[in-house]
Image (cartoon, rainbow, N blue to C red):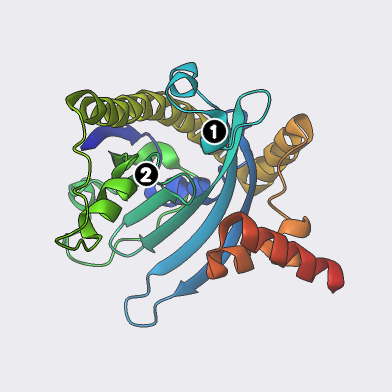
Amino acid sequence: MVKFYENSFSYDYSFPAVTLAYFLRYPNPYSTHVLSTDVIDRHIDPKTQRLHTVRLHLKRSKLPSAVLKLLPKSILGATSNDSSQAYILERSVVDVNEGWMETESQNLEWTGVLSVVERQVYQRPLGLAAMTGDDNINSPPSPRTWDFPQDERTDVTTTVTFHSRLGQSRFLHHRHKPTSPDSDPLPRKSLFQSWSTSSIQRSIEIIGVRRTRDQLSKSKEGMKIVLERLREGGLVGVLEGMRRDREGSGAFAGSGGHVRNGGTWKRVWKDGRGEQGQQHAAADDHQD
């Protein structure tokens, strides 16, 4: 069973300002749950001139009481205070000439419990060329700067997909297991057991939709703060705000810390070994 959530809104800022704020949005007062972030890869496609970026975020979240009632803490990796940490892989593509950015974020852990894929499209309004005096809408856009964001706006469409596979691995294992004529038939799953698995999956997906709705609202408010700092003080204002937020939370390790210099997250992401990969990568750093 799969659930979807979609939302559309607009920022009253120019497309260059919004895309810049997107990459500078951590930390902010609404992102205290983000522990670290690191750029894994970044390059410009020589043919399309589009900027491709891959980042890895480590986030902490308080597990909903409803989830704790459905699943034991050992499965969720929860600590004594019912909190959990997860890595989020983020991919983005920016086309400055055409005025759009596409992003995709997905959790790398606990995907068997709930896989969440968030896709966002940031776009300069299609009719902007006519409003700004461009003669041809297909012609390259005239130079714009984030110094005057009130002249433009940026539309954002968010689509989130939720899919819980809890209990499916056991079913698939029995489904593909070869059987001989003399072997005993597999016990038939009772109606209650089937109902229980599907109900838990559906409940987890509904909880994911509710949490995502709240998190997207906070994410939007955090972006607004970064955009306001950009308008009031430029890049210096944004960096100063990031410094205050980092000192206030005492947890963020995104710029200049050992996370970037050590390259641990980069090796973890490439190896794809989860916690085991982290331990090996940390050991390699220690030996260096």
Look at 72% across and 48% down and name the residue there.
253
Distance from disc 1 to disc 2, alpha carbons, whole Å, reads 33 Å
Three-letter amino acid code at disc 2? Answer: Ser
Q: Are marks 1 and 2 in contact (CB under 8 Å)?
A: no
Question: Any mark on residue 159, and which?
Answer: none
Mark 1 lies on residue: 228
Residue type (three-letter) at the residue carrying disc 1? Glu
Q: Secondary structure at mark 1?
A: helix
- In the visual, does 101 lie left or right of 268? left
Identified at 22% across, 31% down, the residue is: 194
The location of residue 208, given as percent across then percent down, is 37, 30
Please tell me how crowded label 2 is: few (under 14), some (14-19), or many (20+) other residues with Cα within 10 Å.
Answer: some
Identify the mark at residue 115; answer none if there is no mark.
2
Q: Residue at x 39, y 30 (%)?
A: 212
Q: Residues within 10 Å of mark 1 (few under 14, many from 20)?
A: some
Percent coordinates x, y for residue 117 in the rendering: 35, 46
